[in-house]
């Protein structure tokens, strides 16, 4: 049995669409505290994504003995600034304005545990360059996207209307959505969770 330690609807949809059978079990971790501690230790957002993914999996693994628990996380870095999910539309607008006409890096990490022991981890990064859009476009985008702008780091969904924000995207699509899916599927096949 596979347990996804993530409340992300996008990650659930990716696994469902790939034909993976799983259950969802989430447990909150203090992401702000982990990020603050990691900022002192490293300036590597990809490493922070891995630590956050593992922290989530560890919390859930403790109450799911014998099961493979998958933890995931994602970090967005632009010119050394780490972005979090916006808390309201005004914050989403400010984030998008800060990312406008710049290239940022999204790092997504997945960690799999069984009984608290790490079996697998994989981290990938993608580079995305936003175009120079107008304030009118930005206001229209935030209004029409609604609460969806609050559900992702960076305040956009590349798989939808958010595609209009970009002029260049370099990297794996699944990684951009928040889960390096192909590497995870390889791991699950190697461990007999999926047919080879």
Image (cartoon, rainbow, N blue to C red):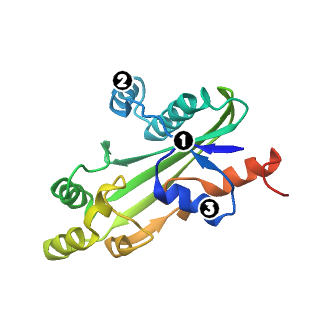
The mark that comes first in sequence, 3 or 2, is 3
**In the image shown, does 139 or 38 lie closer to the viewer?**
139
Tag 1, which secondary structure?
loop
Residue behind mark 3: 16
Residue depth check, mark 3 versus mark 2: number of the one nearer the observer = 3
Q: Quadrant of residue 42?
A: top left
Image quadrant for the C terminus?
A: bottom right
Q: Quadrant of residue 151?
A: bottom left
Q: Is residue 172 visible?
A: no
Q: Quadrant of residue 58?
A: top right
Q: How far apart are labels 2 and 1 at the CA level?
A: 30 Å
Residue depth check, mark 3 versus mark 1: number of the one nearer the observer = 1
Residue behind mark 2: 40
Q: Are marks 2 and 1 in contact (CB under 8 Å)?
A: no
**In the image shown, does 17 or 183 lie closer to the viewer?**
17
Q: Mark 2 Cα within 10 Å, few/some/many (few <14, many 20+)?
A: few
The spot of residue 178 in percent (x, y) is 49, 54
Q: Residue at x 51, y 48 (%)?
A: 108
Residue behind mark 1: 25
Tag 2, which secondary structure?
helix
Is residue 159 rendered to the left or right of residue 156?
Answer: right
The spot of residue 82 in percent (x, y) is 32, 43
Q: How far apart are labels 3 and 2 at the CA level?
A: 37 Å
């Amino acid at each position: 049995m596979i347990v996804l330690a993530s409340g992300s609807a996008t990650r659930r949809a990716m696994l469902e669409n790939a034909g993976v059978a799983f259950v969802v079990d989430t447990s909150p971790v203090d992401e702000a505290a982990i990020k603050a501690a990691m900022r002192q230790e490293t300036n590597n957002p990809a490493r922070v994504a891995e630590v956050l993914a593992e922290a989530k999996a560890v919390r859930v693994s403790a109450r799911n003995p014998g099961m493979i628990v998958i933890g995931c996380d994602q970090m967005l870095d632009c010119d050394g600034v780490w972005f979090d999910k916006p808390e309201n539309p005004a914050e989403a607008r400010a984030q998008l304005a800060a990312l406008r006409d710049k290239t940022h890096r999204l790092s997504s990490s997945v960690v799999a545990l069984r009984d608290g022991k790490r079996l697998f981890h994989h981290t990938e990064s993608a580079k995305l360059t936003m175009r120079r859009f107008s304030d009118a476009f930005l206001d229209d985008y935030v209004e029409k996207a609604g609460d969806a702008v609050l559900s992702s780091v960076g305040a956009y969904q590349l798989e939808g209307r958010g595609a209009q924000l970009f002029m260049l995207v370099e990297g794996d699509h699944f990684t951009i959505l928040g889960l390096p899916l192909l590497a995870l599927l390889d791991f699950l096949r190697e461990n007999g969770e999926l047919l080879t």
